[in-house]
Image (cartoon, rainbow, N blue to C red):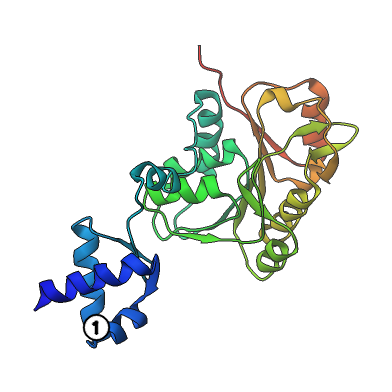
Amino acid sequence: MQEKRLNEIQNYLKNHEICTYEELREYCDVSLSTIKRDIDFLDAEGRLLRIRGGARRLPSDPSSLAQEQQPIEMLKYEPNLDRIAKKACELVTNNDIVFLGSGVTVAHMVRHLSGFKYLTVITNSIYVMQEAFHYNIDVMMIGGMLNRGTMSYSGIQSINQLKGLNANIAFMSCNGIAISHGITNSSEVEGDVKKVAIQISGNSVLLVDHNKFDKISLHTIAEMKDISTVITNKTPDFRYIKEANDGHTELIVVDEEV
């Protein structure tokens, strides 16, 4: 009886590339739970594809399926950035609500957060979400308009969502930092998300590679005095040390790998 019903489902899919559980329930005249079990079984057997809310027939060209299921490019591990990220995680404690912004350096933090308990991570970064999934960390994802260059969400939807939340600490990166123009970002909308993150946290941390000093990008998102802590991997020019001291910003330099 079950095999007959399974064949009926496959025959139905020959004429309908995608169908819902409800369509199949009516077609086979069985309960919804029975149809769901059948779909799970056929998916495990490799006879169809289970999708959200229903099923899809297998493509005639298997290579097209592989292309469709190709994941987002994984975060590439970079030792210099990882040392900055690892140092940043020393500022996190159990039970914290942590905002992790866009940027590769910030995404490197996730692997070092897996040992913390009862951590809540808020992010607009797909890289952070991807890493968090890999390390089994719960994440609250902020939506909006996707920037494919940085693989992060921004825009008015992101800002409105973030304004309704609270965080103990916010970690972010930038495209440039200069005495004359402060902390700058190439994207205005991404910069606006970072501005809100600074506001809702009250404790903001900038992760910046030493190559970003004396660089100016298009939009200023903050002055150094607006940031609680700056973490970099090489001692910057004395002007930045003075700027940090004057603004009561902690400057942390991670030792370079020999």
> Residue 235: percent from the left, percent from the top?
68, 21
> Residue 74: percent from the left, percent from the top?
47, 38
SS for callout 1: helix
Question: Badge 1 is on which residue?
Answer: 28
Q: Is residue 132 above or below residue 5?
A: above
- Among all residues in the image, which is located at the extreme left? 1
* Mark 1 residue crowding within 10 angstroms, few (<14) / some (14–19) / many (20+): some
At 86% across and 31% down in the image, what residue appears? 179
The image quadrant that residue 81 belongs to is top right
- Among all residues in the image, which is located at the extreme right? 180
At 60% across and 61% down in the image, what residue appears? 142
Foreground of the two, 47 or 124: 47
For this view, does 8 lie left or right of residue 60? left
Q: Is residue 146 above or below residue 20?
A: above
Q: Quadrant of the N terminus?
A: bottom left
- Among all residues in the image, which is located at the extreme top? 258
Residue 53 visible in the snapshot: no
Q: Is residue 122 above or below residue 106?
A: below
Residue 142 visible in the snapshot: yes
At 41% across and 45% down in the image, what residue appears? 64
Foreground of the two, 171 or 137: 137
At 68% across and 62% down in the image, what residue appears? 158
The amino acid type of the residue labelled 1 equals: Cys
Report how many numbered discs are placed on residues in the image: 1
Foreground of the two, 30 or 78: 30
> Residue 207: percent from the left, percent from the top?
64, 37
For this view, does 130 lie left or right of residue 149? left
> Residue 125: percent from the left, percent from the top?
58, 49
Q: Is residue 214 above or below residue 26?
A: above
